[in-house]
Image (cartoon, helix red, strand yellow):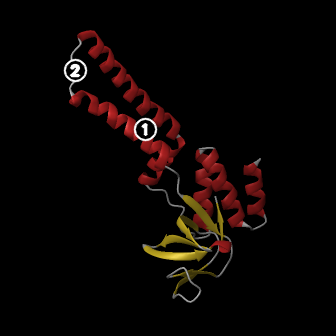
Amino acid sequence: MLLKLAFIYEGKGDFEQALYVLKYLEQKNNARYVSTKIKELAKKHQLVGYENSDLQALFKFFFNYQMEITSVFLFLGLLNLSILAFRQKKSAQKVPIVQVIPSIVCLLIAIGIWHFASPTKQGIIITDHTILMEAPSAAAEVVELTNKGHLLQLKRKKDVWYETDWFGQTVYVKENMVKTF
């Protein structure tokens, strides 16, 4: 259904809405044809931000399987602790701390993944003549004037501004100029 909606938007010439729907669909459904269509539309309209690096693919895999990865580390940590507790009870000798460290590391990794890992927020510029600013202020220097459709990796929000990178430089874009997902 969303794929049809994206094709309708594309047919109407509303390519930024088509890209928004396709990116949303790509996040929910990891289908190769959706990624191919996104790259095709971005290339056709000469848009920035749609390139996928190996690191982005790794992060995407990590966030898609975050629960499973956390469960594996939690299971390994608890399994190792259980085995050590059983050995200690059976032999009545203290377990060396060196044998406990892998369990602690696995449990800390599981807690870290569970608590701190969250996917980066993305947004598509939805208006032509969007101004990218040097600082989160209307009085700041203009870095660039850009058109709609570009994909931004949003770092954080400051008041009504999103901080992002634009060709290696930290810039700010007003929140009403970006549709986030």
Q: Give the label on residue 110, or none.
A: 1
Work out whether mark 1 precedes mark 2 in sequence or the reverse, and give the earlier one: 2
Q: Is residue 113 left or right of residue 127?
A: left
Q: Quadrant of residue 5?
A: bottom right
Residue at which label 2 appears:
94
* Percent x, y of residue 108: 38, 40
Q: Amino acid at mark 1?
A: Ala
Q: Secondary structure at mark 1?
A: helix
* Percent x, y of residue 117: 48, 49
Decide which of 48, 158 is in the foreground and name it: 158
Decide which of 170, 81 is in the foreground and name it: 81
Image quadrant where one finds the C terminus: bottom right
Instruction: State the residue at coordinates (60%, 74%).
Output: 159
Is residue 140 positioned above or below 32 on the image?
below
Decide which of 173, 111 is in the foreground and name it: 111
Disc 1 to disc 2, C-alpha distance = 26 Å
Q: How many marks?
A: 2
Instruction: State the residue at coordinates (63%, 55%).
Output: 23
Crowd tier of the residue under label 1, counting other residues whose Cα lies within 10 Å: few below 14, some 14–19, many 20 or above: many
* Percent x, y of residue 57: 47, 49
Q: Give the label on residue 44, or none.
A: none
Q: Secondary structure at mark 2?
A: loop
Instruction: State the residue at coordinates (66%, 50%).
Output: 25
Q: Amino acid at mark 2?
A: Lys
Crowd tier of the residue under label 2, counting other residues whose Cα lies within 10 Å: few below 14, some 14–19, many 20 or above: few
Q: Residue furthest top?
A: 90
